[in-house]
Amino acid sequence: MACAADTPLPCPLCLTPGSQPFADLPLGTATAAYHRCPTCRLTFMAPACLPTPEAERAHYALHQNHPDDAGYRQFLMRLAGPLMAVLPPGAQGLDFGCGPGPTLSRLLNEQGFPCADYDPLYAADTALLSRQYDFITCTEVVEHFHQPAQSFSQLRALLRPGGTLAIMTSWLMTDDMFTHWHYRRDPTHVCFYKPATFQWLARQYQLTLTLPATNIALLTAPSL
């Protein structure tokens, strides 16, 4: 398959057929094709353009996030603060996609919210995916999903009744920002969300959506 946005594709999130070509743009030394779904409003990279696991791992190795970095901890508090405000005391969670230097789980543990770490590359304890949690965090993760329909279904299944899925990802607010957007130029970022996309997710998975700040989405399951 050629890596060009010249034919409609099925949406990898809502599976609607006929997502429309959106843009062909330079990405590193290549060109990447992007499509837009008219149903869930996801903008996504064409499958033929997706990075290989080896390319992803090499790019992640360039990240310099460290648990003792005060700036990084402050960045993560943009999600942790609104999440902790709605959690019951002692709520137990999972940081899904924790990366090589788990930090958010440490922040939450320090505040009395036990949190385990899972990452398919760096902490792949699949036993953690066989139970449910009061909260799940995904910070700078969902933009990497190659199969978002499958990934969000998995995350929904991991939520206990009343549990909250907390997501941090940069929103695509206006289409004219896309070409030169720094977030788009990361070669491992392959899915881009609008607030409308989170509204679709809430309807699809019977969740209540709260958007407490830009780039932060809380999706809460109904209680029993």
Image (tube, grey):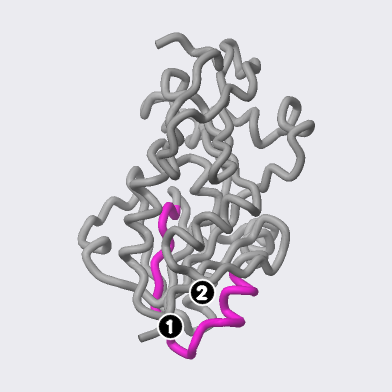
Residue 77, relative to residue 169: is it above or below? Answer: below
Rendered location of residue 191, percent (x, y): 53, 38
Q: Nearer the viewer, mark 2 or mark 1?
A: 1
| Residue 66 showing in the rendered view | no
Residue 3, relative to residue 68: is it above or below? Answer: above
- The magenta segment is 80-98
Rendered location of residue 113, percent (x, y): 46, 80
Task: State the residue at coordinates (60%, 17%).
Answer: 28
Residue 119 — which label?
none
User: Which numbered disc flags the more N-terminal residue, 2 or 1?
Assistant: 1
Q: Residue furthest bottom?
A: 89
Q: Which residue is mark 2?
A: 108
Residue 138, relative to residue 194: is it above or below? Answer: below
Rendered location of residue 193, percent (x, y): 60, 45
Amino acid type shown at disc 2: Leu
Residue 91 — which label?
1
Q: Is residue 100 left or right of residue 127?
A: right
Assess whether residue 86 is covered by the magenta stretch.
Answer: yes
Can you say which quadrant of the picture contains the C terminus? bottom left
Q: Kindly indicate the quadrant of the structure image that contains residue 136.
A: bottom left
Amino acid type shown at disc 1: Ala
Secondary structure state at the residue bearing disc 2: helix
Rendered location of residue 197, percent (x, y): 58, 50
Which class describes the residues within 10 Å of circle 2: few (<14), some (14-19), or many (20+)?
many
